[in-house]
Amino acid sequence: MIASTLITGLALGAMYGLLALGFHVTYAVSKTVNFSQGSSMMFGAV
């Protein structure tokens, strides 16, 4: 049970990290915030 919780937490943290990295790269290049990345991530989860 502890191992599955740890793996789930690491996977969720990795997804949040990749989403944040995408926001950062988009903002650094174009100086605009692209909120469609979050929508795409939620669509991918369905």
Image (cartoon, rainbow, N blue to C red):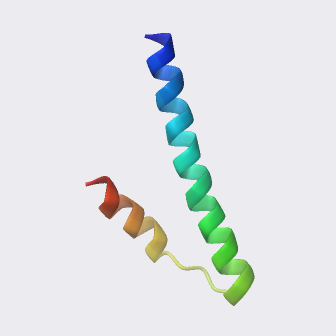
| Residue at 56 percent of width and 34 percent of height | 10
Q: Residue furthest right?
A: 28
Q: Residue furthest left?
A: 46
Q: Residue furthest top?
A: 1
Kindly tell me whether residue 18 is visible in this rendering: yes
Q: Please, is residue 16 above or below residue 20 in the view?
A: above
Q: Please, is residue 31 above or below residue 21 in the view?
A: below
Q: Quadrant of residue 24?
A: bottom right
Q: Quadrant of residue 20?
A: bottom right
Q: Please, is residue 16 above or below residue 36 in the view?
A: above
The mark tally for this picture is: 0
Q: Is residue 2 left or right of residue 28?
A: left
The C terminus lies in quadrant: bottom left
| Residue at 57 percent of width and 45 percent of height | 14
Location of residue 29 in the rendering, given as x and y in whole percent from the top left corner: 71, 85
Q: Is residue 43 left or right of residue 15?
A: left
| Residue at 47 percent of width and 71 percent of height | 37
| Residue at 65 percent of width and 62 percent of height | 21
Location of residue 34 in the rendering, given as x and y in whole percent from the top left corner: 54, 79
Q: Please, is residue 31 above or below residue 42 in the view?
A: below
The N terminus lies in quadrant: top left
Kindly tell me whether residue 31 is visible in this rendering: no
Location of residue 13 in the rendering, given as x and y in whole percent from the top left corner: 57, 41
Q: Is residue 31 left or right of residue 19?
A: right
Between 11 and 42, the one lying in front of the other is: 11
Location of residue 16 in the rendering, given as x and y in whole percent from the top left corner: 56, 51
